[in-house]
């Protein structure tokens, strides 16, 4: 097998151009393995040759990201690589982001395998781990040669189109891809074994990784309740009759904003419900069973709260993706905040 | 669906009257049903005035105050 042509990407520091004072340097290409790329060459041995090292300053790459990326990809492409190795970037944020962007672009635009490496807390991980293989490293360059060996081992597998093991086995950040696998025991046997392990206090690894929900601190209600504006939001499928916004019956990507000004109560004749995840008979008969406009109007009139916000936001929460839920939530929250709303009661079915 | 709300990290949670009519009950008289709805909303207003540090379930009909339910999170 011919040795692979490998191109390395480094920032100005690891490329030995200079420190922070050289962070503005434009991308440049140097023949052979320069700076930290020597560790990559050492790890490659006879399997490959670092034919060129591309170096770019951290600030240049971060401040004009699109232009820098196009320039770097062009320099890389001119070297006709079989494999591109970016980093390791460890905890260096600008560098890690540039490595992730380059690998994703090299694979997407050039069809050339690319691999990078960085610490779990490098922002490049969250930005690019779904689009490229990023090996997990320590926080600094102390074990450079060791990490270079692991990085090269992963890169060689990609360049040779060999099957990869799981993220845990290979040491890269999960890309969120699903692969079929043939296993010896059926699901019942595996679940029972897992339960026995759990009962015995042994380590249990789920086959279904759960999404990691970030903790969001509970904001404090600032004004006194008697002066607060309260909004009603629901994921229960409430829509005006005719569903003017075309809100989906399931897997929603849209939400509606509905004016309730002047309505002491919701008239069932004016509203409908499009949610396909529960029996909507009762909330169609009386929408207050989903949106308590009548009661909150009473509380508004007797001064318990300052005001009911005159716009109700609604979508359907059934088989709705986390990404769309998060986006819709963010957009609704921004609108409520801009309208001076102090608190929200979100009713859910 | 209260355990789901706890699991995803909703901070202030009030159990309501059921999936098919969270703020009502078709088997009640109109008057009783509205009273039930008002109790749930008042509980929500109480939750809004309570500082919480973690997902907290506020009992719908009790005045006993918030019942922190971290057990569900810790056993997850």
Image (tube, coloured by chain):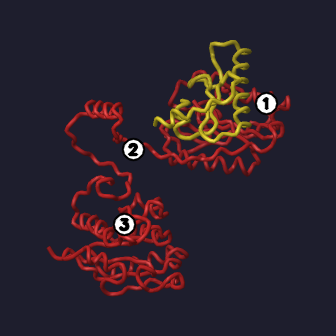
Chain colours: A red, B yellow
Query: Mark 1 highlights which residue?
Result: A297
Which residue in the rendered view is the most extreme toward the right? A302
- Asked if the residue under mark 1 is in contact with the one under mark 3, i.e. CB atoms within 8 Å, the reply is no
Residues indicated by labels 3 and 1 sit on the same polypeptide chain:
yes
Residue A266 image point, x, y percent: 72, 28
**In which quadrant is the N terminus of chain A drawn?**
bottom left
- Rounded to the nearest angstrom, the CA distance separating label 3 from label 1 is 55 Å
Q: Under tag 2, what secondary structure?
A: loop
Residues indicated by labels 1 and 2 sit on the same polypeptide chain:
yes
**Seen in the image, is A22 located left or right of residue B21?**
left
The image quadrant that residue B19 belongs to is: top right
Packing grade of label 2 (10 A; few <14, some 14-19, many >=20) is few
Question: Which residue is at the front of the view, A277 or A7?
Answer: A7
- Answer with mark 3 or mark 1, whichever residue precedes in sequence: 3
What residue sits 37% from the left and 67% below the top? Answer: A116
Residue A34 higher or lower than A175, as above or below: below
Closer to the eye: label 1 or 2: 2
Residue A299 image point, x, y percent: 80, 29
User: Is residue A283 at least partly visible in the picture?
Assistant: no
Query: Mark 3 highlights which residue?
Result: A108
User: Is residue B14 at least partly visible in the picture?
Assistant: yes
């Amino acid at each position: 097998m011919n040795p692979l042509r490998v191109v390395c990407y480094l920032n100005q520091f690891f490329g030995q151009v200079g420190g922070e004072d050289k962070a503005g340097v434009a991308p440049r290409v140097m023949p052979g393995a320069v700076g930290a790329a020597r560790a990559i060459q050492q790890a490659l041995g006879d399997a490959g040759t670092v034919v060129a090292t591309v170096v770019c300053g951290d600030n240049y790459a971060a401040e004009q990201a699109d232009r820098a990326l196009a320039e770097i990809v062009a320099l890389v492409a001119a070297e006709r690589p079989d494999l591109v190795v970016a980093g390791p970037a460890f905890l260096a944020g600008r560098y890690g982001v540039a490595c992730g962007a380059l690998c994703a672009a090299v694979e997407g635009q050039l069809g050339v395998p690319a691999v990078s490496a960085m610490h779990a807390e490098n922002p490049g991980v969250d930005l690019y781990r779904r689009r490229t293989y990023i090996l997990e490293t320590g926080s600094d360059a102390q074990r450079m040669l060791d990490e270079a060996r692991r990085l090269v081992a992963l890169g060689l597998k990609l360049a040779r189109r060999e099957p990869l093991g799981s993220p845990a086995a290979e040491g890269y950040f999960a890309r969120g891809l699903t692969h079929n696998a043939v296993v010896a025991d059926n699901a019942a046997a595996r679940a029972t074994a897992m339960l026995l392990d759990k009962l015995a206090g042994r380590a249990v690894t789920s086959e279904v990784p759960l999404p990691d929900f970030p903790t969001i601190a509970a904001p404090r209600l600032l004004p006194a309740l008697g002066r607060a504006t309260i909004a009603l939001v629901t994921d229960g499928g409430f829509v005006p009759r005719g569903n003017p916004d075309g809100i989906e019956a399931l897997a929603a990507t849209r939400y509606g904003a509905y004016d309730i000004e002047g309505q002491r109560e919701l008239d069932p004749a004016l509203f409908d419900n499009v949610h396909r995840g529960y029996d909507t008979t009762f909330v169609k008969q009386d929408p207050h069973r989903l949106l308590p406009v009548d009661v909150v109007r009473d509380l508004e009139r007797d001064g318990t709260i300052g005001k009911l916000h005159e716009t109700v936001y609604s979508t359907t929460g059934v088989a709705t993706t986390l990404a769309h839920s998060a986006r819709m939530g963010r957009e609704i929250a921004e609108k409520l905040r801009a309208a001076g709303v102090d608190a929200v009661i979100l009713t859910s079915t | 669906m209260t355990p789901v709300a706890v699991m995803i990290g909703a901070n202030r949670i009030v159990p309501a009257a059921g999936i098919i009519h969270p703020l009502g009950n078709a088997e009640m008289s109109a008057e009783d049903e509205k009273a039930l709805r008002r109790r749930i909303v008042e509980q929500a207003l109480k939750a809004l005035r309570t500082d919480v540090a973690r997902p907290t379930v506020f009992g719908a009909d009790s005045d006993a105050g918030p019942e922190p339910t971290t057990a569900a999170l810790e056993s997850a």
